Image: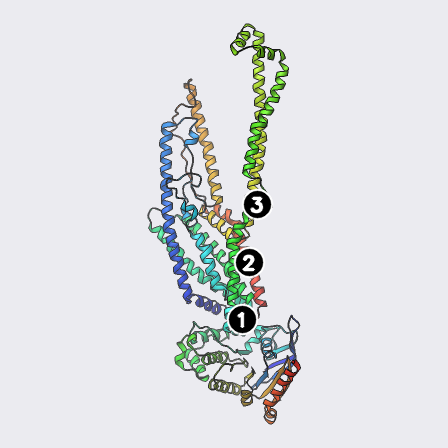
Amino acid sequence: MLQAIDLTKRYEDQQLALDALNLEIKEGEIFFLLGANGAGKTTTINLFLNFIEPTGGKALINGIDVTREPLESKKYVSYVSENVMLYGNFTARQNLDFFAKLGGKPNLTTEDYYMRMREVGLQEEAFEKKLKTFSKGMRQKVGLTIAIIKDAPNILLDEPTAGLDPKAAAELLQILVNLKRQGKSIFMCTHDIFRAKNIADRVGIMKEGRLVMVRTREEFLEDDLEKIYMNYMQEMVIEKS
Amino acid sequence: MFKELLIKELADKIFDKRFLWFTILCMFTLLITESVLLNDYKTERNDYNLRLLTQKEFIDKYAHENRIGDMLDIQRPPAKLRLFAAGISSDMEVNTFTNNSFNVLFPPIDFVLIITVIYSLIAILFSHNSFSGESENGTLRLILSNQVSRVKLTITKFLGGMLSIIISLIISLAIGVIYILMDNSISLDSNDLMALGLIFLLSVFYISIFYLVGMICSAFTGSSSSSVLLSLFIWAVFTLTIPNLSPWVASQLYRVPSINKFEKEVKIIKGIERDDLGRNLCKEVYEKYPDLLNIIKSAKDEKLLLAKLENNIGLKNEYVAFQKEIANAWDKANAIQSAKSENISVDFFSKVDRQIALTKEISCISPVADFSYAVSDMAGSGIHAEAYFKDIKKNFEVSLWQFVEARVAKIKKTDVMYDVNKYIDIKDRPEFSFREENVSGRFSATLSYCIVLLVFNALLYLTLIRQFNRMKV
């Protein structure tokens, strides 16, 4: 479970990146956070991963305050970034092995790796190939395999479908649905409103550091999510001009 | 987890093609260097042995008391570890049989230069993207999303990267040592091998400074291209600017009059001033002997004066006393002016020494200077080694002169006609033998530089931790 309680981040230049975010993502839930560039989506992920310190409030992972116990809290979270380059000179096996050990899974067999790779749609032939020969979609799948191997109850994804072709993006979202069925809490930041409509249980819209709207699946299917999102974006453009 | 991070970092570096190329480059450079320096060493050693033989033959045949000092000009045998650290030439004060002015323009490359230039650059090229590269790949965020603290990551990155460089260094150094040992004309004893071990350690401390510089720049800039530029700038300041600027800065902070001005002043003191003083002192003597002076002036020539003196014993005695007082007056003038000149010399050379010491102190801001001083002293080719040799030489010269004086005293007892130009048999004189200082002595001499290098490492590491904690991942 992921919780943000009045979570605030103001940078040294006094720019308010996140303004008192209150949010809870339950087990087996997929939450999509939508918003324009600079809205505060990545800042939220950075705060959950303790890459930056909050200036107010707190972020909890499975009830653990990430600022007070950063290393302990990281046991319960996996992360998939937008641009997973990984180590190009290492093979997929070496990359998986390294991150599995960092994730606290030191005794996995080749068969274990194969099983996880199949889950994300990677062929076994890719196992001994160097990452630098992989396409972006394949690398993204390896990144997701790393997250799956860690088997943490919470998964944070920062625009993982950016730059992927439609087929690869659809495959990736299907994997997220499977993970949700395993009881994982999934928090994904994206611009991709169409994917959100397909699989999200709840959707939030973030604007200039504030979470301005949260809708459940029933609510956003009833309303026109695309229209709501575009309205917020338009308001922002008008305010700025 | 520490082990995994360390192995990953080490593997990342070792399986990089750059590692292979750098190791091959250093290995071949060191081999060529060793080959040139070994040749130089053999020439110097032959030169030294030939000089010893010539001196021995000459002194056995022509040992005159007033020439022994010149004949027995004690030289220092070339240090074996000059093959690694050329340092100060052992024959810098003498003309060698094969003087080659190109050596001054293009001094031979040695292990010290390979470390200070090539390896320090390798360290920067290996470390400049430590964090920025991982950040650009997205792996830094992925690593830190696990139970890895930033401090642990910096330690493993530093140790892993340094281990890869140490492996390359060991390969190069081992091949260099094997090459030397294969040449039967030189043997390295346990003392030499221990000194080599310490030189290796000093090299590691030195290289790690630049590895840390690269890592700090990587964390500071967050971009690999900016990091490499900033690191190279710092490298140039440490390696080129500070050591070369230090003599100028010292000369500005502590001024010493020019040598021309000093020599001119000494010339005046010992020339015009001495003459004036001598004449004034003589005047006082003249005033004491007015009658005698009138007689001397009235005498048309020396013969007439001598005749007058011979006829008058009282006058003769007065004349002798007068001459003695005149001589004393000039002696006094000489003594006063010599003392004055000596004071100026002492003052001048103490200022020169102080300026040299200040230059050394300023240059120590650069790790290159600390490393060079430490390694050359450890190899027996540095400033300390030169001072150590001079002490031994001085002690030997004292004992040699005691021997010569005793021999002369013995000869004088039997030979009343003895003079300093006469041959004396000193074939049984004490022979000069010089052994390089032992490792513990050399280590004590280099300890302060080692401490400075360690302090550099500690400060840079703390800066790295601070910088990486502030880095946006």
Residue at x 37%, y 46% (from the top left corner): B40
- Residue that numbered label 1 is attached to: B148
Q: Amino acid at mark 1?
A: Val
SS class of the residue under badge 3? helix
Q: Residue B364, position in %: x, y?
A: 54, 50
N-terminal of the pair, mark 2 or mark 1, is 1
CA gap between label 2 and label 1 equals 22 Å
N-terminal of the pair, mark 1 or mark 3, is 1
- Residue that numbered label 3 is attached to: B251
User: For mark 1, does the 10 Å Cα neighbourhood hold few (<14), some (14 to 19), or many (20 or more) residues?
Assistant: some
Q: Amino acid at mark 2?
A: Ala
Say if residue B374 shows up in the picture: yes
- Residue that numbered label 2 is attached to: B458
Front disc: 3 or 2: 3
Identify the disc placed on residue A41: none
Front disc: 2 or 1: 2
CA gap between label 3 and label 2 equals 31 Å
| A198 or B337: nearer the viewer | B337
Q: Residue furthest top?
A: B311
- Quadrant containing the C terminus of chain B in the rendered view: bottom right
- Chain label for disc 2: B
Front disc: 1 or 3: 3
Q: Residue furthest front?
A: B300
User: For mark 3, does the 10 Å Cα neighbourhood hold few (<14), some (14 to 19), or many (20 or more) residues?
Assistant: some
